[in-house]
Image (spheres, rainbow, N blue to C red):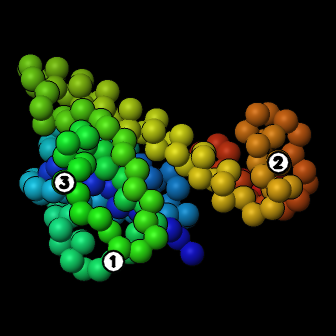
């Protein structure tokens, strides 16, 4: 069963949307991913463009309020804030067995300069979010391995060691499934 993950930022217009899209792309078989904002606004067009450049279309996504998600009673295994620390403290505490994580990324809406400078800054934030999601996916896949033997094989395969001929699915490379 997929674990539910909720990404939260201030406006649900860039950071949380990008994080949701990356987790869906990289670990969509393992997680059901959502995003929301403290004060939902409109999608940031620079975030939409930056994601489109790497083949991910978020242009049809809608923003939503974290408080509406909270009131729905939906349960999440992980609630991950991707805004600054002071904004993260304003998030509600979700019921159930929820692990709350905080990954601080700059807000693309706060970037100054020309359009090209702001787009370059948004690309940098996009790449930071992607790197953090990739790292988390690797961590979670290692944790989710079922037996000590599987964990050992998974760890060895990540370090380039020998793999057993067992027919198990592993995440290497990150985006593609392969049988080892």
Q: Position of residue 51 (x, y in %)?
A: 31, 42
At a point 15% along the width and 44% down the height, the residue shown is: 44
Pointer 2 local density, CA inside 10 Å: few below 14, some 14–19, many at least 20: some
Q: Nearer the viewer, mark 3 or mark 1?
A: 3
Viewer-nearest residue: 56 or 2: 2
Position of the N terminus, as image quadrant, is bottom right
Q: Residue furthest bottom?
A: 73
Pointer 3 local density, CA inside 10 Å: few below 14, some 14–19, many at least 20: few
The residue that mark 2 highlights is 152
At a point 38% along the width and 32% down the height, the residue shown is: 127
State the CA–CA distance, disc 2 to disc 1.
35 Å
Precedes in sequence: disc 2 or disc 1: 1
142 horizontally vs 150: left or right: left
Element type at mark 2:
helix
Element type at mark 1:
loop
Seen in the picture, residue 16 relative to 146 is either above or below; the reply is: above
Precedes in sequence: disc 3 or disc 1: 1
Point out which mark residue 74 bears.
Answer: 1
Q: Are marks 3 and 1 in contact (CB under 8 Å)?
A: no
Query: Residue 4 falls in which quadrant of the image?
Result: bottom left
State the CA–CA distance, disc 2 to disc 3.
40 Å
Q: Nearer the viewer, mark 2 or mark 3?
A: 3
At a point 19% along the width and 54% down the height, the residue shown is: 90
């Amino acid at each position: 069963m997929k674990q539910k993950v909720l990404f939260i930022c201030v406006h649900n217009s860039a950071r949380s949307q990008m994080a949701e899209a990356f987790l869906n792309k990289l670990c969509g078989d393992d997680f059901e991913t959502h995003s929301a904002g403290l004060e939902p606004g409109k999608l940031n067009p620079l975030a939409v463009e930056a994601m489109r450049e790497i083949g991910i279309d978020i242009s049809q996504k809608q923003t939503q309020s974290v408080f509406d998600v909270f009131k729905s009673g939906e349960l999440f295994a992980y609630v991950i804030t991707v805004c600054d620390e002071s904004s993260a403290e304003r998030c509600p505490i979700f019921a159930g067995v929820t692990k709350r994580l905080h990954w601080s990324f700059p807000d693309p809406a706060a970037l100054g300069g020309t359009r090209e400078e702001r787009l370059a800054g948004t690309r940098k934030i996009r790449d930071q979010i992607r790197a953090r999601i990739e790292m988390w996916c690797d961590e979670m896949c290692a944790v989710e391995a079922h037996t000590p033997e599987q964990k050992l094989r998974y760890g060895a395969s990540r370090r380039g060691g020998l793999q057993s001929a067992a027919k198990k699915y592993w995440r290497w490379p990150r985006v593609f499934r392969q049988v080892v």
